Image (spheres, grey):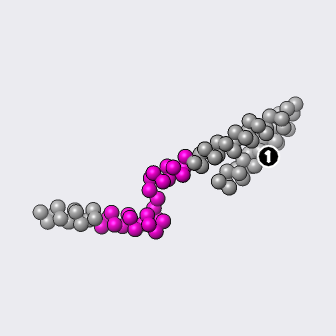
Amino acid sequence: MEAARLRLLLAQAERAERENRVREGELVEAAAAASKWGELAGRANAVMYQVLVDELPPLLAGLAAEAIRVEMKKVHSRVVGLLAEL
């Protein structure tokens, strides 16, 4: 009986500690993290689509391989910068 009581007290203490850490911002609930991740992934996809599909093809039209490589490096740096702002 004493072991069961101790397990219950331990579970209550762990729950209280977890709730305190969430309240203080040290932990994030899984559902909130998944929601935020989905939002960021959607925004990243939109940025990449805009740059790679809408903006890049006219820049690359008629360029030689080395010039395409240079432009792709520029675009990569730009996309990384845009994604960092998310």
Residue at 45 percent across and 61 percent down: it is 27
**In the rendered image of this protein, does residue 21 appear above or below residue 31?**
below
Mark 1: give few (<14), some (14-19) or many (20+) Cα within 10 Å. few
Q: Secondary structure under badge 1?
A: helix
Q: Is residue 32 left or right of residue 86?
A: left
**In the rendered image of this protein, does residue 68 appear above or below residue 34?**
above
Residue 45, horizontal then vertical, whole percent: 64, 42
In the figure, residue 10 lies in which quadrant?
bottom left
Q: For the C terminus, give its image quadrant.
A: bottom right
**In the rendered image of this protein, does residue 65 appear above or below residue 80?**
above
Residue 69 highlighted magenta (yes or no):
no
Residue 60, horizontal then vertical, whole percent: 83, 35
In the figure, residue 4 lies in which quadrant?
bottom left
Q: For the N terminus, give its image quadrant.
A: bottom left
Residue 43, horizontal then vertical, whole percent: 63, 46
Q: Is residue 39 left or right of residue 5?
A: right
Dominant secondary-structure state across the stretch colored magenta = helix
Residue at 59 percent across and 45 percent down: it is 41
Q: Is residue 21 left or right of residue 39?
A: left
Residue 23 highlighted magenta (yes or no):
yes
Q: Nearer the viewer, residue 32 or 71?
A: 32
Reading the image, the residue beneath label 1 is 74
Q: Amino acid at mark 1?
A: Lys
Residue at 45 percent across and 51 percent down: it is 31
In the figure, residue 21 lies in which quadrant?
bottom left
Residue 6, horizontal then vertical, whole percent: 20, 66
Segment tinted magenta in the rendering: 13-38
Q: Residue furthest left?
A: 1
